Image (cartoon, helix red, strand yellow):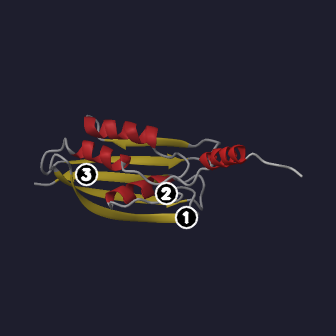
Amino acid sequence: MMRFNGGVLGAACLLLAACATGPKASDNAVCTQIDAWGEGLSPGQSSSVELVRGGVWMVNHYKRCTHAEGDLAATRFCAWLMDNTSTEFMEYNVNRALACLQGQRVVGYLGNTGVDAWSGTARFTRLTASEDMFRVELRYALDYSAPSEETMMQLTLTALD
């Protein structure tokens, strides 16, 4: 008959449980960056960025972010988007943006959701910690039925009086 040391077995169970990973929940990093971008706008001023993904994954895929020339806040936000968004799954980026702008936390997978095509526009009003108010318009379009087609997420901020 075999005997097990309860301490060793317990430690092994804890180690296995610690290694198990679940789906990543959404975070508010996108909104933190949007707020920093929006705080620099004067009343009535607008600023836009567009994140685009295209090409065939693992063959000639690419991601780019465009904005108006000379818009330093949009330049910084684009740089953040390039480093902190998915190249493979645009719906991941859209889900993260929608979750933070709605004040929600998505638990579960944000990308590779099985979405074949999705497009829309959503508008939100945000009040930053420094009490700047601005409107955020999020436009997005993706269609994975044509693998070489571009998908996009566009954010436009407009400072309110």
Q: Could you tell me which secondary element the residue under label 2 belongs to?
A: helix
Q: Nearer the viewer, residue 23 or 118?
A: 23
Which numbered disc flags the more N-terminal residue, 2 or 1? 2
Left or right? Give the position of 102 relative to 150.
left
Q: Nearer the viewer, residue 43 or 22?
A: 22
Residue 118 is situated, as x and y percent measured from the top left of the image, at: 48, 65
Q: CA distance from mark 1 to mark 3?
A: 27 Å
The residue carrying mark 1 is 115
Residue 91 is situated, as x and y percent measured from the top left of the image, at: 49, 57
Residue 72 is situated, as x and y percent measured from the top left of the image, at: 26, 35
How many marks can you see?
A: 3
> Residue at left 57%, top 57%?
112
Residue 107 is situated, as x and y percent measured from the top left of the image, at: 48, 60
Q: CA distance from mark 2 to mark 1?
A: 8 Å
The residue carrying mark 3 is 157
Q: CA distance from mark 2 to mark 3?
A: 20 Å
> Residue at left 64%, top 43%?
58
C-beta proximity under 8 Å, tags 2 and 1: yes
The residue carrying mark 2 is 91
